[in-house]
Image (cartoon, rainbow, N blue to C red):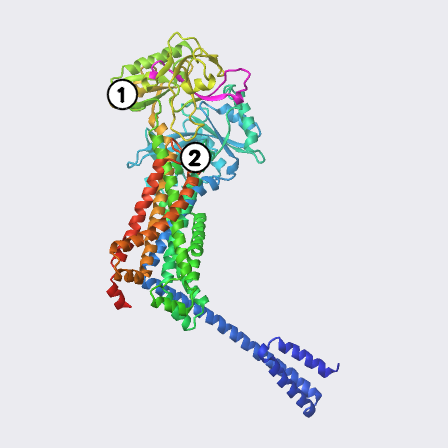
Amino acid sequence: MDLASLVWRLTERRLRRVLPPARVASVLGDLAEDFARRRTTAGVVRAHVWLIGEARSLRAAYRAAAMQHAVAHTSGSRLMLADDIRHAWKRLTARPARPLLCAALLALGIGLATAMFSVVDSLLLRPAPFPHADRLVRHTLFRPEPDVMDAWRSGGMFEAVEAVRLRVFELRAEGAGTFRGAFVTPGVFDLLGVRALRGRLLEPSDARPGSDDVIVLSETIWRTAFGADPHLLGRRVRFAEESLVVIGIVSADVRFPTPVTVAWRPLDPATPSEEPTTIYGRLTAGTSLEAARPRAAVIMKALAYVPPNWGDGPKLSSIVEQDDDAFRRGGLWLLFAGVGLVYIALCGNVCSLLLSQVSARQREFATCAALGASRARIVRQAILEHTAIALAGAAGGIGLAAGLTTMIPDLFLERTLNVIDVDLRAQIVAAVLGAASVSIAGLVPAWLGTRSSPADSLRGSRQGGGDVPAARRLARGLLAAQIALACSLLVGSAILLRSFVHLANADRGLALDGLVLINVGGLDEAFARGPAMALGTAAIAAQVRTWPEVSAVALSREVPPTWDDALVRIDPSIPWESALRADSYRVGDDFFDLYGIRIVRGRRFAPNDAPGSTIVSERLAALLWPGQDPLQQAFDVGRTPSRVIGVAREITLPTLDAETDRPEFYVPLGSDSRTLYLNLRCRGDCPPGHVAQERLASVHPAIVARVTPPVERAFLSELQLPRAVAEIGGVFAIVAVLTAAGGLFSVMTAVVGRRRREFGIRTALGASPSQMRRLVFADALRLVALGVITGSAGGWIVARSLSSFHYGVTATDPVSWVAVLGTIAVASIGAAWRPALDAMRIDPVRLLREE
């Protein structure tokens, strides 16, 4: 190969990289001719120099042209997109009613789902807002605990151990009212990794007598009660009967040991108290909760804090663990699933509305296509409109969720140390739901609504049938799905409501109306154990019976439904781990009369009863001695052998958790109780706590009296979860029914509009208005029947999944099903009524004139 051929090949290869395919042959051909001519006229060397320069010029020129073309194409695309956005905005604002309705429906669905996610996220997904929250554990004791704390610290399984006692404070500053605080050992804040927002936190010296008149406040009460006064630190503030110095402010996010605790005072754990103390500890790295539980139980048994018949002993619990955690988890996930169904139903309704809107614009789309617009651009314009609606819905949903989280029931607020609000995680969920709504409710209408050809669209428009068959079928299918979802949610809601009504009206087996409790403490300091304690207890009872307000009084160590947990066995060979768990009550002679608990067999307690005399409930007797006479039967509860002298009517705790409502037995009050309850019935208002304290001080000045919440409140607390689930489920069901009714109204209105020509011809041929009405109702009935049939199957599945929430009802409860079907029938008739009237009022003459 000679030098000329080599130079030409290299030049040709470089030019091919930049030349457009259509220009390669012509440009290279002209260049080859000019190169050959110059070789003969100017010489080989000059020809090669010319070739190299000409090739360089061609490459630069074509590369610049290619870049200019790319820039022009990009700029054109940007201009086209900007133009599409501007046109989409004009279309939305020209007729804003339907876009606003769609945005409102999406905002409702996104708002409900985001608020429910905030609750689930706070209660179940997020850990407690403290460092190493998974290693924080607790246990509650009912007497001074320094020995236990020291043993835990020296046991090698805890990095830190602190103590907490709850207290209600009354702030006497500008009518600020009462709030909940806690007495804490100074190391609690280090245990939780909390730092002061202003001032300082508690120090060990603050817990010493004489210097314990200090208090740390939450930012919440600092702002609400003191107006964020920057000069509050170091000042004395009157709290009830005490004047305390405010030494520090902590962030409002610090919620410990309860979600409503807003103040902290120093605690010396060796100080005697009638209030229970909860010990908190942080496990060492590598020590699991399961491994620490038996070691802590051994310590407490060795220190005689628990009786030997407690099996494995008391169990440590995580800082966020609840006794009925699994049950409440089920309720939360149930509500989360329900709000998910509501969101899907609302998206389906929006999809139907957008389908009808896009279908009504067939003539517009056909005109655009006839003028040269591609289907891709038409779809893009529709998607831009739907995206704007979804963005408005997401923004409205975040605002709605923020409002809803301020109305979260106390049942949920009191179960988490996290703040329930629309944080970044919830906002991300709202954004994802907004994007999902575009996919669910926007893409399908945009694709189907632009599917037909221009000729078909123009022809259909002239004939009065402006929508696409595929879009029409999808809209009807979506409506049937909405009705099915509404039916399923209604069934679940109706059964939950019926369960709650049964729970609220359940026979509890005892009378609680007008019952007031006074907790009496300080008996250890007032009387010695044994005969002196018995005489002191009798003196207290005699003193209370002289009060003019009191009509009846009974003494007890426990009150329903607060019990002393006990293990029961009739055979000593049965290990305590396999024994029957029951509720134990230590009561006085008048307890059964005061509470209206009837003795169905045997007798009640008498002063000369032998030790171990016991009264058992009907259920416990049936469990221990099925088919036998329980009287004089013996059983073991780890103390003196017990013998049955009577059988009492069963106390029923209205609860959905079978483990909570256990059988019970009663033993005499005895003379070894540090505290006892005065169970009072009064002729009018019972004496307040300070009056009771003054009167009981005449028996002994060491006695402490405190009025406690009514027993009725403890029973009503068991109804909180069923009530909340029923109420929130009912809201979801109502939203779903209204959504389905709105969808039916929209679809039937579109049907009547599409069949106006048909209805006009029928009327002209002699059809009566009632026949037109029947045609519309028959069409609606077919859709409703399809949805109800599908929804009934789904409702049965939903009802079966709610079995843990059933109380006195089953999945086939006839009252619930009749109520559901009746509600759907009424809603369907109401939704189809207006379209039916429109069909009845079609005038054939006017229709022909319009044609």
Q: Which residue is mark 2?
A: 803
Mark 1–mark 2 CB contact (< 8 Å): no
Is any atom of residue 708 visible in this view?
A: no
Could you say where residue 112 lies in the image, as x and y percent from the top left? 38, 47
Q: Amino acid at mark 1?
A: Cys
Q: Helix or strand or loop: what does disc 2 sit on? A: helix
- Graded by Cα atoms within 10 Å as few (under 14), some (14 to 19) or many (20 or more), the crowding at tag 2 reads some
- Examine the rendered structure and indicate whether residue 651 appears above or below residue 255: above
**Image quadrant where residue 811 sits:** top left
Query: For residue 225: magenta?
Result: no
Q: Nearer the viewer, residue 708 or 236?
A: 708
Give above or below for 548 relative to 181. Answer: above
Q: CA distance from mark 1 to mark 2?
A: 41 Å
Whole-percent x, y for residue 774 in the image: 29, 52
Give the residue at mark 1. 682
Q: Nearer the viewer, mark 1 or mark 2?
A: 2
Quarter where residue 91 is shown? bottom left
The relative height of residue 850 versus residue 142 in the rendered view (above or below) is below
| Residue type indicated by callout 2 | Ser
User: Which residues are the magenta region?
Assistant: 566-592
Residue 492, given in percent of the width and then of the height, sits at: 39, 40
How far across and down, in percent of the image, does residue 129 sit? 47, 40
Which quarter of the rendering shows the C terminus?
bottom left
